Image (cartoon, rainbow, N blue to C red):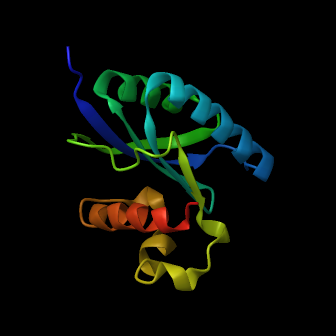
């Protein structure tokens, strides 16, 4: 039976301040687990907020999202979209990561107003902006 690929986008606020070591640990754990479960995606961190896309079969993606909602590191977890997809957008990464706090704002032309509001204010009107930001974040990956 062929499983349908699915993509989820959620935002959350860190429940407690994450140190650089905390973020590295989170990434290592996520990448190892995602490798086993066949999940790909990207995590963007900015001013205590997370914006993440998860890709995989629908059941696996929602199981992982359920774990994230229960994870003590995340607060105010909001699912903004889930959709069936034909192909993965982040197929090269078990979990790509961009810390926007370390990116020169001049490289984020056109996103300053969106970033000022924070990820928690995603709405139907600016969801396309979030998608474009994630695509641009690929430029900051190795």
Residue 46 visible within the image: yes
**Residue appearing at x 56%, y 49% in the figure:** 13
In this rendered view, identify the residue nearer to me: 124 or 83.
Answer: 83
Residue 118 visible within the image: no
Q: x%, y% of residue 135? A: 39, 63
Q: In this view, does 3 lie above or below 53?
A: above
**In-image side of 135 versus 70 (left or right):** left
Q: In this view, does 102 lie above or below 122?
A: below
- Which quarter of the picture shows residue 16? top right
Q: x%, y% of residue 32? A: 61, 29
**Residue appearing at x 47%, y 41% in the figure:** 77
Q: x%, y% of residue 68? A: 52, 32
Tag count in the figure? 0
Q: Quadrant of the C terminus?
A: bottom right
**Residue appearing at x 62%, y 80% in the figure:** 104
In this rendered view, identify the residue nearer to me: 32 or 19.
Answer: 32
Q: x%, y% of residue 129? A: 33, 68
Residue furthest to the top in view is 1
Q: In which quarter of the image is the N terminus?
A: top left
In this rendered view, identify the residue nearer to me: 36 or 102.
Answer: 36
- Which quarter of the picture shows residue 105? bottom right
**In-image side of 142 versus 131 (left or right):** right
In this rendered view, identify the residue nearer to me: 110 or 69.
Answer: 110
């Amino acid at each position: 039976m062929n499983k349908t690929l699915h993509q989820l986008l959620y935002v959350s606020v860190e429940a407690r301040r994450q140190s650089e070591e905390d973020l590295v640990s989170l990434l290592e754990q996520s990448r190892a687990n995602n490798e086993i479960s066949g999940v790909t995606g990207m995590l963007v961190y900015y001013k205590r907020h997370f914006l993440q896309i998860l890709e995989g079969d629908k059941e696996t993606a929602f199981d992982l999202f359920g774990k994230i909602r229960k994870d003590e590191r995340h607060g105010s977890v909001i699912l903004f979209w889930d959709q069936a997809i034909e192909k993965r957008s982040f197929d090269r990464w078990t979990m790509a990561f961009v810390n926007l706090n370390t990116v020169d704002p001049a490289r984020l032309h056109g996103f300053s107003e969106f970033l000022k509001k924070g990820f928690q204010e995603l709405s139907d009107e600016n969801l396309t902006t979030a998608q474009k930001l994630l695509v641009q974040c690929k430029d900051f990956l190795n």
